[in-house]
Image (tube, grey):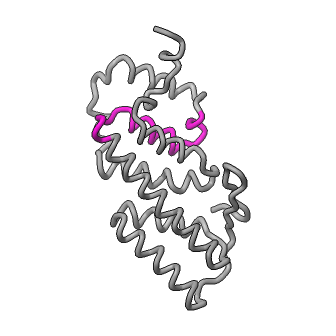
Amino acid sequence: MSNVASSRRWYDDKPLLSETIKNLLSLPYSLQLVIVEGVVYLLNKECEAQHLIRALRSVGHQNVTGLHKSKNRRRQYDANPYLHKAMNYLLILSTEGQALIAEQVQELLECNLEYFKTCKEFGGDSDLKDVAELTSVYVEQGNEAALQQVNQIREEFLSGVRAQNKITMAATGSEMQVRGDAL
């Protein structure tokens, strides 16, 4: 086996999952915490990931190696405890389960992006509490309900009800930064 093949991550051959993980890793840490907490809940809700981990007797050589490496905490996603947990849950899911979750996480990220665009459009500050609520609505009620929530926020801006908040997001080059108070 070549060095290139052996250095590939377990999700690299799954384009949507790989893109989803890359997108999550590109978020500022405080935003990542909020969204990935929802992702872990989504994994438990949709795929019963906690039950799968308890029920497994053998997850295969590659997965055992991946879980062992997760204890070393050297990978980029190991710095965030929720992302670390989500990655371990994703590792044990079937390919179909991984694809389902990747699609849902992409939708969740798009909903949050719509929220940030709305805040920018109206010159308002974004708030991590809004992101947490939007993420919770997505996980509990789905994409349509989350998009309705973004539309409600847009209406609040239009009617002048929406006040300035503490957390702002600023895009600088290829990375986003959170300014202000964190949760």
Q: Nearer the viewer, residue 45 or 27?
A: 27
Q: How many marks do you count on the picture?
A: 0
Q: Residue 25, percent across and down? A: 57, 43
- Figure check: 29 above or below 3: below
Q: Nearer the viewer, residue 64 or 10?
A: 10
Q: Residue at x 48, y 52 (%)?
A: 37
Residue farthest along the top direction in this orientation? 1
Q: Which residues are magenta?
A: 76-97
Mostly what secondary structure, the magenta segment? Answer: helix
Quadrant that contains the C terminus: bottom right
Q: Residue at x 51, y 79 (%)?
A: 153
Q: Residue 121, percent across and down? A: 62, 75
Q: Residue 40, percent across and down? A: 42, 48
Q: Residue at x 69, y 71 (%)?
A: 166
- Figure check: 82 above or below 13: below
Q: Is residue 43 left or right of residue 8?
A: left
- Figure check: 92 above or below 114: above
Q: Residue at x 46, y 30 (%)?
A: 12
- Residue 78 inside the magenta-drawn segment: yes
- Figure check: 57 above or below 180: above
Q: Residue 30, percent across and down? A: 62, 54
Q: Nearer the viewer, residue 69 or 100?
A: 100
- Residue 80 inside the magenta-drawn segment: yes
